[in-house]
Amino acid sequence: MMRTVALPGGEVVPALGQGTWYMGERRGDAAREADALRLGVDLGMTLIDTAEMYANGGAEQIVAEAINGIREQVFLVSKVLPQNASRSGVPAACERSLRRLRTDRIDLYLLHWRGGYPLAETVAAFEALKAAGKIRHWGVSNLDTADMEELVGVPGGTACAADQVLYHPDSRGIEFDLLPWCVSHRIPVMAYSPLGHQVRRLLRWRSFMARRRRRWRSRGACATAT
């Protein structure tokens, strides 16, 4: 049974999703990448995370192929680049992502990282997209505790549905401040690169493998770990 996480509005999503960083960069890999994502959905990993930055939109096109015919089964996450995070830039970027994804809405739309535009301006643009039905939830990525404090202080900022940050066994800094802050404010944290960047080394760890044998009995869990 896949574990789940409740968003602030009450919607439940899988605790384990699929990322698409580095997908869409080589045309010859496109079919294999789409097949891998579709297999993940079949195994219960129905949250798919992508971004306009990944392969300059190429990853979103891979996702579009993977979810063709199964869109209603998928919780779709994408991200807007900070240089596009203005009041007019956000809706324009969102429309481009929607076209590449071949869908009429994004379930969770994130600010990829903080840039030069005021958070209040980006939040206002996100809220306008929600009102128009283009996105269902919005959130942020790579924002630290001070950024999050500022975010919830701007009009509409408390509607933030998630903060997606780097978090894995070799990078646990968020446990000291950001993670407790998000827990106290009931904002879910999404971890990217949760196995780190040296997965083969991680799999050699005796304690990690012991936990894998005890807990990861289903095909889905094993496919995720390998």
Image (cartoon, grey):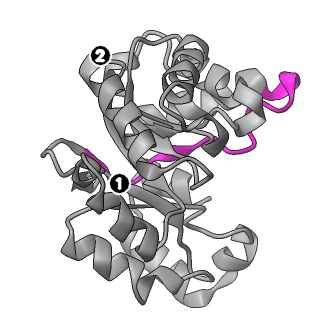
Q: Is residue 15 magenta?
A: yes
Q: Tell which tag, 1 or 2, sits nearer the viewer.
A: 2
Q: Which residues are magenta?
A: 13-29
Farthest-out residue, left? 10
How far across and down, in percent of the image, does residue 100 sit? 61, 15
**Numbered badge on residue 162:** 1
Element on which disc 1 rests:
loop
Q: Is residue 203 magenta?
A: no
How far across and down, in percent of the image, does residue 53 sit? 70, 37
Quarter holding residue 30: top right
Q: Amino acid at mark 1?
A: Ala
Residue at the spot x=68%, y=45% of the render? 21
Pointer 1 or 2: first along the chain? 2
**Numbered badge on residue 132:** 2
Q: In which quadrant will I find the C terminus?
A: bottom right
Tell me if residue 186 comes above or below residue 130 in the rendering. Answer: below
